[in-house]
Image (cartoon, rainbow, N blue to C red):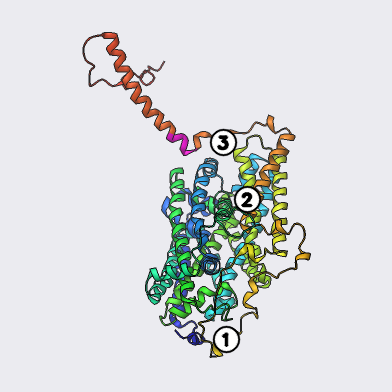
Amino acid sequence: MSRDSLVTGSFVIADYVVFALMLLLSAAVGVYYAWADRGQRTSGDFLMGGRRLTAVPVSLSLTASFMSAITVLSNPAEVYRYGASIGFYGLSYVMTMAVTSEVFLPVFYRLSVTSTYEYLELRFNRATRLLGTGLFIVQTILYTGIVIYAPALALNHVTGMDLWGAVISTGVVCTFYCTMGGLKAVVWTDVFQLGVMLAGFLAVVIRSVILQGGVLNIISDSEHGGRLNVWDFDTNPLRRHTFWTITIGGTFVWVSIYGINQAQVQRYISCKSITHARVSLYINLLGLWSILLCSVFAGMCLYSVYKSCDPWSAGLVSATDQLMPYLVMDILGDYPGLPGLFVAAAYSGSLSTVSSSINALAAVTVEDLIKPYTNMSEKHLARSSKGLSLVYGALCIGMAGLASLMGGILQAAVSIFGIIGGPLLGLFTLGILCPFANSKGALSGLVSGLVVSLWVGIGAQIYPPPLNLTRPLPLTTEGCNLTTTGSLNWTSTALPTQPNSTTAPVHNHHSRPVLADWYSLSYMYFSPIGTIVAISVGLIVSLFTGGWGLKVDSRLTLMKEDTTLYHMIKCLKDRLMRRTGRLDLTTDLDRDKGIGNTNPAFCDVELDLTKSRIPS
């Protein structure tokens, strides 16, 4: 396979048509729901889909929301560089769904809140609610800007697709269908976009399997290259990815997304019954697994194709995020339309995340910052929800512009997701699981959790962990045929970075502070640290400020009746009672009468006098 064919590897008309079709179909859904629900008189209809959604579309939408382009482009590159250990996320997804459906879902569903931060005021006070809302808005706008910008940058370098054209078209289409159709449009476009994401992955995987001569060849290449050394049970918390960092750290990160993040909670609360909401979480698990499996296998395909000629070390791409688009242009370039499908897949990831964020931001602003302070009618609130969708859409596009100036801070901002999400998760856990936690404890817990996780996160940026803790796997350029200068000039638009630019600048041993090891903590643990600090400080402060005497409305905390386990035990008890009750009854009757057989038509239910009591 000649590498110089890549010089001509750019988008053709068919690719642009496929990409444009994806954008058009997404916009069409918005128009359809705007027309179908033109009777949407209330902001609740617009933001919550009128609480009439069913389990299947909601579950697919839950999957698509946080499976962004970062998943499509970065997960395969992660497997290529560090091996397939991220497959353990599959376990953390299971634990996340269990915790969410048993702990957070019952409370939020019972209170039928539109904004999750509404709960904080009901349970603690107005100040806690406003601080939570503020943190959520900052975190979401930051994350969304990156989600729009990161794929545009990677795809621009490799496919020659116009950078700002892509950023603005994505942002505008997204804002359009959010503003027009509300939550229903967001949910149904997510379903469509999830399909596009899977199709894009499958195109790459199938073509790679054909090229490499079968799935077994790809697996054996990955095995020889050390990409399958996943059984790493090292408990050292400084190691970047091990079984423990991914399952434990990953569970905290994902619970902070599924359990309390407005974008996700808003979806499952919009289901028509709590059973639908629970089922949607477990169906969504299948979606998460399939995307994870596709992205890990795509990473193995990437390694199998480039095992003897790494495009990154050879300077053909300037960042690992560009490896996946590079592979697409390399192996699918001869099939017009298929590179377009992959780019559509990457952008579908972005669109689904951005639309969820815009809708969630509008919901939070209306519920937490407008409703409590004004006496607007429902009609005006519905209009302001649409206006806010527009404003936040524009803000996110602006944030993408800022992301372009941030350069190396991309991973920092994704870590901010864990840094802010962790303490917030601690705050909600305090409220739901600790009846004696009071508002003083909640606020001090949230602030201290935030301070500690920011301290670790910023420290990790300044003093990145040494290579013996991150352990990138070896790559080689021995099999490269780089005689043509064209292929090297071809990325001249890329930033002039050295291939090893992602490895941290090595500070000499003396300049590393005493706390350097603390800063080398795996980034997966930023979220658990924030959560644990917030809960611990919150409990201690609550106990010292009279939390014991606190009387909390039982609806605001988790009750034993909320858990599935309680219902299972109750059901078993009932069955046993029925069985033993019937046997006791018959033996008693036989013993009392001493004669005759029991009547087979006799049923103990007839003796249940509570049901046949005559009303007085």
605 to the left or right of 200? left
Q: Is residue 362 magenta?
A: no
Give the Cα separation between the discs numbered 2 and 3: 27 Å
* Magenta span: chief secondary structure: helix
Q: Nearer the viewer, mark 3 or mark 1?
A: 1
Residue farthest to the left, as pictured: 596
Q: Which mark is residue 528?
A: 2
Residue 79, given in percent of the width and then of the height, sits at 52, 66
95 to the left or right of 467? left
Identify residue type, mark 2: Pro
Mark 1: few/some/many CA within 10 Å (<14, 14-19, 20+)? some
Q: Which span is picked out in magenta?
A: 563-568
Q: Secondary structure at mark 2?
A: helix
Identify residue type, mark 1: Leu
The quarter holding residue 460 reads bottom right
Q: Say which residue appears at 49% left-offset and 38% top-offset.
A: 563
Q: Which mark is residue 488?
A: 1
Q: Is residue 567 magenta?
A: yes
148 to the left or right of 439? left
Q: Say which residue appears at 25% left-offset and 9% top-offset.
A: 594
Q: Nearer the viewer, mark 2 or mark 3?
A: 2
